[in-house]
Image: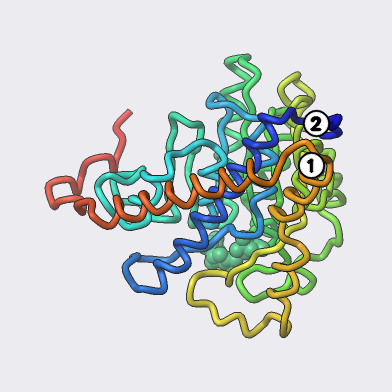
Amino acid sequence: MSKNPFPLDKQGLLEAYRTMRTIREFEERVHNEFAKGDIPGFVHLYAGEEASGTGIMMHLNDRDRIASTHRGHGHCIAKGVDVKEMMGEIYGKAMGSCRGKGGSMHIADLSKGMMGANGILGAGAPLACGAALAAKFRGDGGVGISFVGDGASNQGMFLESLNLAAVWNLPAIFVVENNGYAESTSREYAVAVDSYVDRAAGFGLPGVTVDGTDFFAVYEAAGEIIKRAREGGGPALLECKMIRFFGHFEGDQQTYRGKGEVEHIRANQDCIKLFADKVLDAGVIKRPELEAIDKEIVKLIDEAVITAKAAPLPTAKDLMTDVYVTY
Ligand SMILES: Cc1ncc(C[n+]2csc(CCOP(=O)(O)OP(=O)(O)O)c2C)c(N)n1
Ligand SMILES: [Mg+2]
């Protein structure tokens, strides 16, 4: 047996692989099913970005809360939301995570600490501050994490939240998922600073930039930041530089992307392939072990699609349930 050079034991490595592969298979399948015209609304896919959500979420438990973005499927899966209920939600069915009333951009499961995907850019950041404030009052060591894209990082709500988290010394973490584009606008055009670490410093927060296609880089940086927040060390920003495989939304013609750009990144910067190469080369995991997981996941996602398609829609009498909460 080879010596394990990784920060996770074999079981942890297999878990990381399973989560990333589940996200990838889910997204590739939604891409194909959406093209058939059966899925209502808009979907934004997380394929290519799996190492970020997975590397962060592996440090969390159900008491920790996250606020996601419009590109939220990967965050949901990594936070433990049931994939069949997620698929049901995407198809708008009554068995969905939000009883079919939210769709892709509102999938939530509070029992898992998943406060929701969010169609409003930057809106997750104040929610994460609220969750972090609650955890601080409770003194339970929980954290609140907000994900935000490079484009959304220009939103006032996000910047105000950085300040709030710093002045209240909240166990809040702001993850900038920098995939280089906001819809078709390049980051270079729209964001004045080269590094989000500089932006964080302006608000009094420590920041770290990592290669978001490297699971281990994300896992280690997130681990330090989350541990510090749990121990009362306050908020931080983590920038993950990453790549999206698909268009901004399904149907995007991607005319703003270079010729061969997607083929190149799929061949050379696929975070799952990079992860698999590392663990196989080190001899810690054998290829058949990964292939067995691949097989299980294809079956799971297949069942999720079949179940979601066959499931009933919500009925008119369900219209007003789970919509408003009276406190
Ligand atoms: C407040 C607000 N403004 C604009 C939009 C429209 N919109 C949806 S996604 C998007 C681009 C987001 O880019 P980024 O934050 O980089 O995330 P990515 O899509 O790259 O993951 C825009 C402008 C919105 N949903 N909310
Ligand atoms: Mg972006």
Task: Give the residue at mark 1.
Answer: 216
- Which quadrant of the view contains residue 194? bottom right
Write the residue at 57% across / 41% down. 78
Q: Secondary structure at mark 2?
A: loop
Write the residue at 56% across / 32% down. 65
- Relative placement, left or right, of 99 versus 68 is left
Q: Position of residue 40 (x, y in %)?
A: 33, 65
Which residue occupies the foreground of this view, 242 or 9?
9
Give the amino acid at mark 2.
Pro
Q: Position of residue 104 (x, y in %)?
A: 42, 56
Vertical arrangement, residue 296 with respect to residue 103, above or below:
above
Q: Residues within 10 Å of mark 1 (few under 14, many from 20)?
A: many
Q: Quadrant of ligand 1?
A: bottom right
- Relative placement, left or right, of 249 versus 42 is right
Write the residue at 51% across / 62% down. 28
Task: Report if the CB atoms under discs 2 and 1 are less than 8 Å apart.
Answer: yes
Q: Position of residue 191 (x, y in %)?
A: 77, 65
Give the mark nearest the N terminus, 2 or 1.
2
Which residue occupies the foreground of this view, 28 or 153?
28
- Relative placement, left or right, of 284 versus 310 is right
Q: Secondary structure at mark 1?
A: helix
Task: Give the residue at mark 2.
Answer: 7
What distance separates the C-alpha of mark 2 from that of mark 1? 8 Å
Vertical arrangement, residue 106 with respect to residue 33, above or below:
above
Query: Disc 1 beta carbon < 8 A from ligand 1?
Result: no
Give the amino acid at mark 1.
Phe
- Which quadrant of the view contains residue 143? top right
Q: Residues within 10 Å of mark 2 (few under 14, many from 20)?
A: few
Which residue occupies the foreground of this view, 77 or 62?
77
